[in-house]
Every structure is written in structure tokens, then in C-alpha cells.
């Protein structure tokens, strides 16, 4: 078990220098600090909440110099305390660690650090000197002693800058950086930051569920920064040739022709994986069962949320970068995994998605009944209707069973398809619904009726047509051992809700028959592809899987993050025969496992300024068509929203016993 030799954490001083190793204080509520990577002990850790030294041989001054060097390098330069203070402190610590004289005394360094903390304009400056202040306040004698002797020994480790919004984003997009560029009037540079992580910026700017905004510290003052709104703004400002120019600038030199990779599925995971492989110089073929790219983003997200021309322009980046899109190619029907390797592909990525709906499992359920629709199949009909391929019109009342985004899309689409009324039936409470709260609110504005704590018990039909659904009232149970509140049926609460159409939107799964035993790719107990969490490698060497087919139904941003991770793993597999250790991922693990970026109150008073919202079509107008509901904000509003960002950057540093292996991010 790792123990503290000395340090300050969350304002608490720990000093075990005079104690035996076994008597030294334990880490204050932190876990996972025994080693950074296998066989590489963590000797010290520095962050915005203080510092902890776990090895008495650590050269404190050198470690603080490394930490402050990162702060100085990352300073935006817009305020003097951070711009000048971080550099002066860095240079003074640099001289001390080399045993050289410096024009600044330790009192001067302490004063500069205090000025940074109290007068800087953003989170980086306000927290960047916290560890140094703690060290100079409580362990100044160590720094003075180190300065009086020869230069200290070489130390290993790494520094890492992040923010709550970055860590909350599955793709780890540097959100404050692209917001800075918006504020500076450089939307093209902002787009470049996003394109480093994924190609579908305009799509994500419309349908992302905004994990970043959930972590935004600005919401403790008024409302979270409109991160998704700004993403859409820069993507819409710089679409087409601008985006292509940025991505072409990021492409490595082309690899030899035999460096070929097959990507199965052109959904967000597959597109993202292919995109990053193409940037690495690989020759990529994307095999897609449908005749359109985008996966669930194409067929499952209606046009009023995501216009199809926007999606086409972004998935088209694959062919623009030299990749091939092979449509009408379905795994399990037109080819197998063995076939792909026989064709000479060095690796395979499975981005199959989950496009087969789940059944309700209630009495009277029959998929052949007129009016019974699985959620995914219904959204595909909506897609074909809007595209003009096949006309579909609804009559009478529609009941949608489910509480996720697919259920919301089905309900809002049904209204636009002619339903006289639409009901959403959900077995839990409103606050338990997994759907994006903005989608729930939009559905309510459009007149969709919600039935919470209600569950279908029986589907009613006559002469092969659905006539209604029998519902049961549910009630919450007492929380279980994990604190989870379940629901149970209320006896005698049966009632009938008449309807002509019932849409089952309770979940999706991998299409049966896509993978067989001969493919050598194991499935888990949820019928998802079993893939290693860190590398996305499957049970078959050279085959990787990500997105919904590996995780179960999730979000577009999770799928694109999986595509990026898989591309890095595939690159490692082909070039080195194994997946490399990822230092930045390990640092994120330490931060997240110990909630180091938990939302807290901003360090300085912030004047309330409520966020800019998208202009929207009137609810009475938009339910009559599939035109996009939300519109792009203007440049002035984008500038005003960008100014609301508090730039909550934090710097973290680890000192290790041995060099940290180089690897993917």
C-alpha cells in the first residue's frame, strides 16, 4: 500500500518523514497510486488540490519545476499574473534545481504564486500554483536544502493538462481550446481542434448528449456553457472545403499498398475508425450493409434533428481522404471475417451497431400484427419517407413504449407522419428517463403525452390489427442495497389505451447471424461483441470492435471515441504486433477513479450571464414537416457564449521510478 512521506492535500498537511515506512500516513482517500504502469512505482503526485510525495528520495524542487513549466507552457497569455508569473516562477525553480543563483528569493516566488492564485482570470492561473504554495508554506526547508547542494538526480514522469469538460467527453476533445478560438474570432482553428478527435463535428453539434456540459463548472453560477451550440457554430461556419483542408493537413504519408484495413459498418464508430486510419496513412475499405453511410445517425435520427445533407457531407470525408465505401455488403451474408483476411486486410474493425429491436415480451405481442412496429424499423421507414423512397402515413393514435432517445425520435416522427395523437409509455419516473432532457422537453412542446410509471401488460388486437394496449400503473419500491429504486405493479390498476400503432422502442441489439462461430469472435452474455476495454481487441487476433456492437446501445460521441481508440490499437497491432501502453489514458484513470475533477465552486466571483440558446421553429409549425428545428446561432451570439467559459484547466504531474513507456494518447 502506498504511503505518504510528506505533502499537502485538500489543505491537510501530511508529514511522515520521521516515521518508519509502516507508520507513515496512508494516502488520503486515494486509490490506484501503487504504480503508474506495470513495475513502475509512483513516487509523487502534484495537482490543483496539492501534492503528495511517496518516496523520500524525490527531488521536490525538480518536480515543482516540471509542474510549473507545464503551467507556463499552457498559459493563454491574456492576463499578466499567469503569463508573467508562471514564467518567472518556472525560471526561478529551474535555477534552484540546477544549484544556480536566482534573482528571485523563495519569498518572491511565494508572492508571485499567491498573486497568480488570487488575480488570474482563468482556472489554469488560479490553481496552477497551488501545489507550489503548499510546498513553500509547509515544506520550505526541503526546497532550501535541495538548493544548497548539487543538482538533483534525473527524475521520470509526465505532466497532463485537462479540464472537467475534457474528461467528461468520451473523445477527450479540448473544449476550452476550441472555445478560446471562437472567442478570438477564429472558427476555422476551433474546427481544427475538433477534427483532431473525430470527423463528424456538425453532426455531433446537433445530436450530442453533452456530457461536457454536465461537467461544466459554470452551471454552479448560472447555466453550463453552450459547448454543443458552439461546436455546431464552428462546424457550420467551416464546412465543406475548409474541413477537408484541415484533415488533409493532418494526413501522414501514405503507407505501402499492403497496409490495408477493413472497417465493417459505416456508422459513427466505423467512420471515426476509418478516418483516423486514413490520417495514419492506411488504405481503408468500409463495408456497409445499407446503401447510405452514417448507421443509426442516418436512419435513426430524423431530419428535424439532423439534416441528411449535413451527415452526407461529413461521412464523405472518407472518400475525400482516399478511402473506399463499399455499400450493400453485409457481414454474414456477403462476406465473413475469414474472407476479409483472405482478401489481404491486415486488420478488421467491427462497427456493426445495434440495429435489431428488442421485443416487449408481453401478452399478445405479435410482430405480424398490422400496426406493430419495432422502434428501429419504424425510424427506417421514416428515413425512406423523408428521402422520397417509400411513402408512409400514420392514422389514429400512436403509443411509443420506451424512455430513450430512440423512443423520443419515434414519438416526434410519428406526429409528423400524421398521427392524431402520440403517447409515450415509460415504466419509471420522468427523472429516470435516459433520453436527453432537451428531447423530452421538445416532445412535450409538440403536444406528445407522457405516461410515467406506466407499463404495457397486454397488446390488444382484432382481425390482425392492433387496437390498443393494456397498461399497468407502477409505483417505486424502496431503494435496494445499491440505492437503486425499482418499480412494481399496482394491483388492480389495469386500464386500456386505444391506439392504431404501437412502437416498441425499449432497446436494440446486434443483428442475429452477423457473426458465427466460424468467425472466431466471442460474444458476451448481452449478445454484444466481447472486446477488451483498453484496446477494443476481440478474441480473434487482428479483429477489433467498438461502438454499439461492443458496448450495447450508446451515444454517437461514445461510438466516435471507440473508433479513435480502435484506430490507435490497430496501428499498434500492425506496426508493433501489440497494443502500446497509453500514458495519458492511465493519468485519466487516476483522475477519474479519484474524482479529482469533481465539480466544485469557481475560485472567484463570476457575474451571472445566462447562455445563448438556438433559435427554433415554432412548435405548431415544425410538427407539420421534417425541417430542422434548431438553427445555428450568429457570430455575435457565439462570441458572447464563448466568453462565458471559465477555462477550468487543471495541471497534474506524476513522478515515477522508471521512464514511462511512450504510447498512444
Image: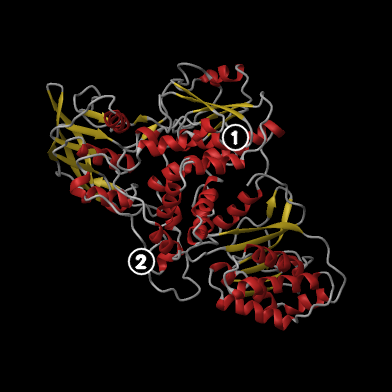
Residue 318, percent across and down?
A: 52, 32
Where does label 2 land, which residue?
A: 610
Q: Is residue 19 visible?
A: no
Work out whether mark 1 precedes mark 2 in sequence or the reverse, and give the earlier one. Answer: 1
Res. 151 image quadrant = bottom right
Residue 374, percent across and down?
A: 29, 30
Give the farthest residue toward the bottom: 107
Residue 113, percent across and down?
A: 64, 77
Q: Please, what secondary structure does the residue beneath circle 2 have?
A: loop
Question: Viewed as shown, does residue 109 lie left or right of 294?
Answer: right
Residue 663, percent across and down?
A: 68, 45
Q: Nearer the viewer, residue 232 or 610?
A: 232
Residue found 38% across the figure and 64% down from its top: 223
Crowding at label 1, few (<14), some or many (≥20) Cα neighbours within 10 Å?
A: many
Where does label 1 land, which residue?
A: 277
Distance, label 1 to label 2, CA atoms, is 41 Å
The numbered disc on residue 541 is: none
Residue found 70% across the figure and 73% down from its top: 89
Question: Viewed as shown, does residue 9 lie left or right of 61?
Answer: left
Amino acid at each position: 500500500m502506498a504511503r505518504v512521506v510528506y505533502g499537502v492535500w485538500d489543505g491537510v498537511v501530511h508529514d511522515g518523514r520521521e516515521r518508519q515506512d509502516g507508520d507513515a500516513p496512508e494516502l488520503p482517500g486515494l486509490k490506484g497510486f501503487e504504480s503508474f504502469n506495470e513495475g513502475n512505482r509512483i513516487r509523487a503526485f502534484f495537482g490543483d488540490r496539492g501534492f503528495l510525495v511517496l518516496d523520500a528520495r524525490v527531488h521536490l524542487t525538480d518536480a515543482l519545476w516540471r509542474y510549473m513549466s507545464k503551467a507556463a507552457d499552457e498559459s493563454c497569455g491574456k492576463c499578466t499574473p499567469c503569463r508573467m508569473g508562471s514564467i518567472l516562477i518556472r525560471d526561478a525553480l529551474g535555477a534552484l534545481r540546477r544549484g544556480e543563483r536566482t534573482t528571485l528569493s523563495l519569498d518572491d516566488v511565494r508572492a508571485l504564486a499567491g498573486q497568480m492564485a488570487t488575480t488570474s482570470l482563468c482556472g489554469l492561473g488560479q490553481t496552477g500554483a497551488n501545489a507550489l504554495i503548499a510546498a513553500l508554506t509547509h515544506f520550505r526547508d526541503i526546497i532550501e536544502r535541495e538548493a544548497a547542494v548539487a543538482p538533483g538526480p534525473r527524475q521520470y514522469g509526465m505532466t497532463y493538462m485537462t479540464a472537467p469538460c475534457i474528461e467528461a467527453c468520451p473523445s477527450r476533445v479540448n473544449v476550452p481550446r476550441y472555445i478560446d478560438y471562437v472567442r478570438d474570432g477564429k472558427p476555422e482553428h476551433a474546427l481544427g481542434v475538433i477534427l483532431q478527435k473525430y470527423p463528424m463535428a456538425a453532426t455531433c453539434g446537433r445530436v450530442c448528449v453533452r456530457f461536457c456540459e454536465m461537467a461544466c463548472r459554470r452551471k454552479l453560477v448560472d447555466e453550463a456553457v453552450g459547448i454543443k451550440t458552439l461546436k455546431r457554430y464552428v462546424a457550420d461556419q467551416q464546412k465543406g472545403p475548409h474541413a477537408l483542408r484541415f484533415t488533409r493537413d493532418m494526413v501522414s504519408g501514405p503507407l505501402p499498398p499492403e497496409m490495408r484495413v477493413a472497417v465493417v459498418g459505416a456508422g459513427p464508430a466505423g467512420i471515426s475508425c476509418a478516418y483516423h486510419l486514413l490520417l495514419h496513412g492506411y488504405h481503408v475499405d468500409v463495408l456497409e450493409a445499407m446503401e447510405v453511410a452514417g448507421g443509426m445517425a442516418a436512419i435513426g435520427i430524423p431530419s428535424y434533428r439532423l439534416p441528411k445533407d449535413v451527415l452526407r457531407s461529413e461521412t464523405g470525408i472518407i472518400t475525400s481522404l482516399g478511402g473506399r465505401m463499399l455499400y450493400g455488403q453485409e457481414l454474414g451474408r456477403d462476406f465473413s471475417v475469414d474472407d476479409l483476411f483472405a482478401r489481404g486486410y491486415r486488420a478488421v474493425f467491427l462497427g456493426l451497431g445495434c440495429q435489431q429491436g428488442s421485443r416487449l415480451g408481453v401478452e399478445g405481442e405479435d410482430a405480424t400484427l398490422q400496426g406493430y412496429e419495432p422502434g428501429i424499423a419504424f425510424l427506417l421507414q421514416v428515413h425512406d419517407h423523408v428521402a422520397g423512397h417509400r411513402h408512409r402515413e400514420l392514422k389514429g393514435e400512436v403509443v411509443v413504449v420506451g424512455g430513450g432517445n430512440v423512443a423520443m425520435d419515434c414519438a416526434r416522427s410519428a406526429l409528423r407522419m400524421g398521427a392524431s395523437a402520440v403517447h409515450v409509455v415509460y415504466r419509471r419516473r420522468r427523472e429516470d428517463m435516459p433520453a436527453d432532457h432537451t428531447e423530452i422537453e421538445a416532445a412535450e412542446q409538440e403536444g406528445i403525452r407522457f405516461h410515467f410509471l406506466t407499463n404495457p401488460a397486454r397488446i390488444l388486437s382484432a382481425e390482425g390489427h392492433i387496437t390498443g394496449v393494456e397498461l399497468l400503473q407502477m409505483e417505486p419500491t424502496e431503494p435496494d442495497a445499491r440505492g437503486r429504486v425499482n418499480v412494481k405493479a399496482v394491483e388492480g390498476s389495469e386500464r386500456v389505451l386505444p391506439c392504431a400503432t404501437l412502437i416498441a422502442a425499449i432497446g436494440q441489439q446486434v443483428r442475429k447471424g452477423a457473426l458465427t462461430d466460424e468467425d472466431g469472435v466471442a460474444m458476451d452474455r448481452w449478445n454484444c461483441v466481447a472486446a477488451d476495454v483498453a484496446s477494443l481487441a476481440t478474441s480473434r487476433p487482428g479483429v477489433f470492435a467498438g461502438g454499439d456492437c461492443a458496448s450495447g446501445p450508446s451515444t454517437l460521441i461514445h461510438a466516435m471515441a471507440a473508433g479513435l481508440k480502435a484506430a490507435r490499437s490497430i496501428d499498434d497491432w500492425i506496426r508493433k504486433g501489440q497494443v502500446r501502453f497509453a500514458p495519458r489514458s492511465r493519468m485519466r484513470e487516476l483522475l477519474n477513479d479519484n474524482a479529482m475533477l469533481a465539480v466544485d465552486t469557481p475560485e472567484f466571483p463570476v457575474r451571472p450571464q445566462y447562455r445563448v440558446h438556438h433559435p427554433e421553429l415554432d412548435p405548431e409549425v415544425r410538427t407539420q414537416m421534417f425541417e430542422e428545428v434548431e438553427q445555428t446561432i450568429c457570430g455575435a451570439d457565439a462570441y458572447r457564449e464563448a466568453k462565458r467559459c471559465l477555462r477550468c484547466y487543471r495541471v497534474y504531474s506524476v513522478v515515477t521510478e522508471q521512464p514511462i513507456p511512450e504510447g498512444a494518447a
